[in-house]
Image (cartoon, rainbow, N blue to C red):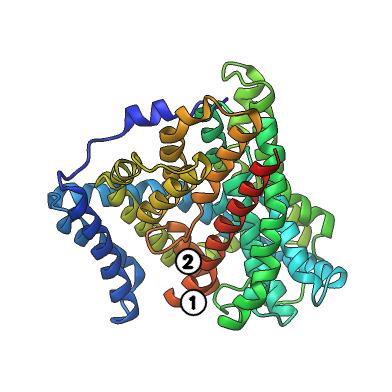
């Protein structure tokens, strides 16, 4: 089903950097998180420094050698920046092209003309769900941010009223719907049917995204009533443009990476042969890096040239787009470093050992294991892979529909309560200009709602099927 299997990941897993017992390791995790929160909230330390110090504190409390802790942190930081960081940079370039050319104005003006008032949050969740279907969460974020911020600014909406529905749409697709990597790995591990999982996933996703998105955004906007951060809002061009890109050309440019990634996912499902020539091509053009790079290159013509930009003007736009995201890249990278330190310390294995003797229904067991690993490591992917590997024997005697529901239960658990050990937490915090407390009250609560509501519908379906 997918080249990424539980067996491969297990074989590549490194030995823990500490021999600490589970009790000491659990205390070390809590202490590391406490250090980060204290430094940021009380001492007002920059999140990059706080995450770095918190990672070192975690390793120290767990009894790991300082050199091993530093190696884990830098490995996680490097891999996060190499992956997510490049996508953020390409997204920033595309966003700047959209803003300077007037393309973003065109999209926002069209959305505001077609949907307003109470309809707007529903429009945002629909757009985000469509865009997020084939995309990694981080890619969807960088594509949606310019539109979210401009709609909130122009329409005078609370940022949470517009932003939460968009985040919910992206997150639900990422955690529950194949062809996203997490659900695909779980389907492979449990030998579940992809088509049945996709169908049941959509059934669960629709009410979940409604409750966690437009409905919850009403309360989130009351708890955290903020406006879009001025430094992140795509600015109008300093001079009036004689022309700007059409709505169709702008939308096509934004959706280009979506189409390329969706094409790759469909070919992988239908062909399922890495040696096939067509699949080799789509694997390249449908990778997040190439898909976003293609959108940037196409955007230089469909956006920049369409607005009458010269080559020098386009080059200047690209250069100006990168400076504002330096802080975001460092913070997200440090979040990845802290997550890797947790993983290398053996926190995932600790959770698995605790869960071996839990005598509860399989669906609930899969969800709880994924929740525990998600809370401890901050990684939805690690939570999905670990939980799927542990409960795989239970799926052998399940019906086709219940095996698919077990996949969805694990995916739902992997989204539970994103906090300071999740790079996505810092990505949302910085883009939306919130502090740690505001991010916990909005983004973290939204993720928890998605996890719990999805699990409730999964359990309901298990009674009906």
Label 2 sits on a secondary structure element that is: helix
Judge left or right: residue 436 versus residue 292.
left
Instruction: Pinpoint residue 385: horizontal percent, then vertical percent.
Output: 44, 38
What is the count of numbered marks?
2
Instruction: Pinpoint residue 115: horizontal percent, then vertical percent.
Output: 84, 70
Label 1 neighbourhood size at 10 Å, few (<14), some (14-19), many (20+)?
Answer: some
Q: Examine the rendered structure and indicate whether residue 303 appears above or below residue 367.
A: below
Residue drawn 51% across and 26% down?
3
Instruction: Pinpoint residue 192: horizontal percent, then vertical percent.
Output: 59, 29
Q: Examine the rendered structure and indicate whether residue 46 appears above or below residue 265.
A: below
Which image quarter is the N terminus in?
top right
Q: Earlier in the sequence, mark 1 or mark 2?
A: 2
Q: Examine the rendered structure and indicate whether residue 185 appears above or below residue 88.
A: above
Q: Which mark is residue 438?
A: 1
**How far apart are the two marked residues, 1 and 2, measured between alpha carbons?**
25 Å
Q: Nearer the viewer, mark 1 or mark 2?
A: 1
| Residue beneath disc 2 | 323
């Amino acid at each position: 089903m997918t080249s990424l299997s539980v067996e491969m990941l297990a074989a590549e897993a490194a030995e823990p950097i500490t021999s600490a017992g589970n009790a000491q390791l659990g205390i070390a995790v809590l202490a590391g998180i406490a250090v980060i929160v204290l430094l940021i909230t009380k001492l007002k330390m920059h999140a990059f420094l706080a995450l770095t110090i918190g990672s070192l504190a975690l390793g120290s409390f767990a009894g790991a050698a300082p050199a091993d802790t530093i190696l884990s942190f830098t490995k996680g930081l490097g891999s996060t920046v190499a992956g997510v960081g490049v996508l953020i940079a390409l997204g920033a370039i595309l966003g700047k092209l959209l803003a300077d050319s007037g393309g973003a104005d065109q999209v926002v003006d069209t959305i505001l003309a077609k949907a307003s008032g109470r309809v707007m949050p529903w429009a945002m969740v629909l757009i985000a769900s469509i865009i997020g279907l084939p995309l990694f969460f981080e890619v969807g974020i960088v594509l949606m941010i310019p539109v979210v911020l401009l709609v909130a600014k122009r329409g005078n909406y609370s940022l949470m009223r517009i932003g939460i529905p968009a985040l919910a749409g992206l997150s639900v697709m990422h955690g529950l719907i194949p062809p996203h990597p997490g659900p695909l790995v779980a389907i492979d591990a449990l030998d579940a049917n992809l088509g049945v999982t996709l169908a049941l996933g959509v059934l669960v996703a629709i009410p979940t995204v409604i409750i966690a998105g437009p409905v919850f955004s009403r309360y989130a906007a009351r708890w955290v009533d903020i406006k879009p951060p001025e430094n992140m809002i795509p600015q109008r061009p300093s001079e009036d443009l004689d022309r700007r890109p059409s709505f169709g050309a702008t939308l096509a440019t934004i959706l280009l990476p979506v189409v390329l990634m969706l094409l790759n996912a469909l070919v992988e499902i239908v062909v399922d042969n890495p040696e096939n020539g067509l699949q080799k091509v789509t694997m390249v053009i449908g990778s997040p890096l190439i898909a976003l790079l293609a959108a940037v290159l196409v955007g230089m013509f469909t956006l920049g040239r369409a607005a009458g930009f010269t080559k020098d003007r386009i080059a200047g736009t690209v250069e100006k787009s990168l400076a504002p995201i330096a802080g975001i890249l460092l913070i997200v990278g440090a979040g990845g470093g802290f997550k890797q330190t947790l993983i290398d310390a053996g926190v995932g294995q600790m959770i698995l050992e605790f869960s071996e003797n839990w005598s509860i229904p399989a669906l609930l067991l899969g969800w709880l294991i994924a929740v525990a690993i998600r809370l401890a490591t901050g990684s939805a992917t690690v939570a999905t892979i670990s939980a799927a590997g542990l409960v795989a024997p239970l799926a052998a005697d399940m019906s086709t529909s219940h095996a698919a529901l077990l996949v969805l239960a694990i995916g739902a658990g992997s989204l539970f309560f994103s906090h300071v050990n999740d790079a996505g937490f810092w990505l949302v915090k910085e883009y939306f200009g919130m502090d740690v407390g505001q991010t916990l009250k909005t983004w973290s609560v939204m993720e928890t709602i998605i996890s719990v509501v999805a699990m409730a519908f999964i359990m309901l379906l298990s009674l009906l099927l």
